[in-house]
Amino acid sequence: MAITQQKALSKIFGDPQKKILKRLRKQVDVINGLNDKYEKMSDKELRAQTDELKKRLSKKSVTLDTILPDAFAVAREAAKRVIGERPYDVQLIGGMVLHEGNVAEMKTGEGKTLVATLPTYLNALEGKGVHVVTVNDYLAQRDAGWMGQVYDFLGLTTGVIINEASFVYDKDYDNEHHDDPRMRKLRPVSRKEAYAADITYGTNNEFGFDYLRDNMVNDVDLLRQRELNFAIVDEVDSILIDEARTPLIISAPAAENPDNYYTFAKIAAKLVPEDYVLDEKRRSVALTDGGVEKVQKLLGIKNLYTPDHVRSVYHMDQALRAQTLFKRDKDYVVTNDGEVIIVDEHTGRLMQGRRYNEGLHQAIEAKEGVPVLEESMTLATISFQNYFRLYNKLSGMTGTAFTEAEEFQQIYSLDVIQIPPNKPVIREDKEDLIFKTEKAKLKAVAEAIKDYHKQGRPVLVGSGSIEKNEQIAKYLEKEGIKFEILNAKNNEREAAIV
């Protein structure tokens, strides 16, 4: 349903958002009424409430909704004692929206990480596991280490899975060498143990790939994940809408002579724009008739499109895609060791261990003149959309979801609920500035940063690619401005920089 239609129906039936918020505010009053009860408890007594709530939940007549007020009040008091942060009333509302399997739209700075602890604690009491999905490994570790303190205080376990590693929160463990103190209590464990925790943090990529790996094993003891019970997805619009159809692929090596990739990379480099038709939006490219003739001449053959040259067509297509559609320091980086690593187009982060399929990665390696590794064939695949629809209950949070409300409802049966801010928003949203040239725009950005810098105001500059990131850096250097640059090339320093 379009937003304009929603407005029209609201005049007739009343605003459904207001009705939902009114109902949830009544629950907030109930939770607030329990504050004195739990504030008076000792740490030991408060911790014991987890077992009490589990006992209540074991009765057939008692549901998660029944114990919600007490669970939220307990989690709120625990957060106040352990990390010094007490969820506001609007954060309680956000937590209830998530528990009910909806999308909570919360503005930046409203404390989504803390909000998630409330429904996470409540649903973890069932013992079926809760997955908290973040957009990168850094946030997964940070939030698991940070909020793991609260869950540990309440007697629950916290796991975290990242690329090629997994951990559990352990207050008796101390990795004193870690830059971020919030991550020092994360003890390395097996993947299975991290998933066996009451709560598991991780990225959409890691959860999805582990699901695929589990579907390829033939021994139950080798399974990593448990039942896909409940997931809370951070930046839900990015993961469930923008990346919805992104395929996760597990592959195995396939025999292919690497020399073929180098041969066609050289041919692709000799082609000019008149030799092909490029569609950057659809990420497709095709040879023109003139381009076909040039390729045939370079290969010394009469007809490229005969059964004998099927592999040549395949190699030419991938070499041409690598040459024209995939850009270094935007789509991928080349390490000092000669490894081609994909850059996530949505997060700007390196996707370690991930490779393009169908020979494209090899074509890029040949284009860059680095060693060509074995080609792969697909063994298992699933899209994010299909993976997240496997959960018994799904919810999410973001700062911008209402514009995609229709898609969330149609694809995932999720309603988007706008959570009011704790305090009125005083931010000024100014009009966009448009420049005739890229150079003029970058110069204006540098000058604006210089002005803010003189005022002692910190500035965060976001860009769409590593290349753009480094262009802005050059302009700042010209202005004599000190800065830190964070992109896929140095993301291991993220904790120190942020």
Image: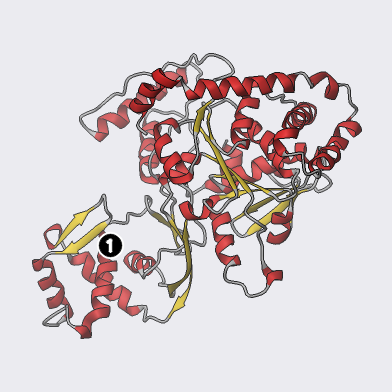
Q: Which residue is mark 1?
A: 321
Q: Nearer the viewer, residue 480 or 224?
A: 224
Q: Is residue 96 left or right of residue 62?
A: left
Q: Position of residue 132 (x, y in %)?
A: 62, 44
Can the viewer see residue 347? no
Q: Position of residue 347 (x, y in %)?
A: 46, 45
What residue is shown at x 63% (from left), y 36% (from top)?
A: 99
Decide which of 318, 41 is in the foreground and name it.
Answer: 41
Residue in the image at 29% along x and 67% along y: 318
* Quarter placement of the N terminus: top left
Q: Quadrant of residue 363?
A: bottom left
Q: Residue at x 82, y 39 (%)?
A: 56
Q: Amino acid at mark 1?
A: Arg
Q: Secondary structure at mark 1?
A: helix
Q: Looking at the figure, which quarter contains the C terminus?
A: top right
Please state the horizontal and vertical placement of residue 136, each as a whole percent of the image: 55, 46
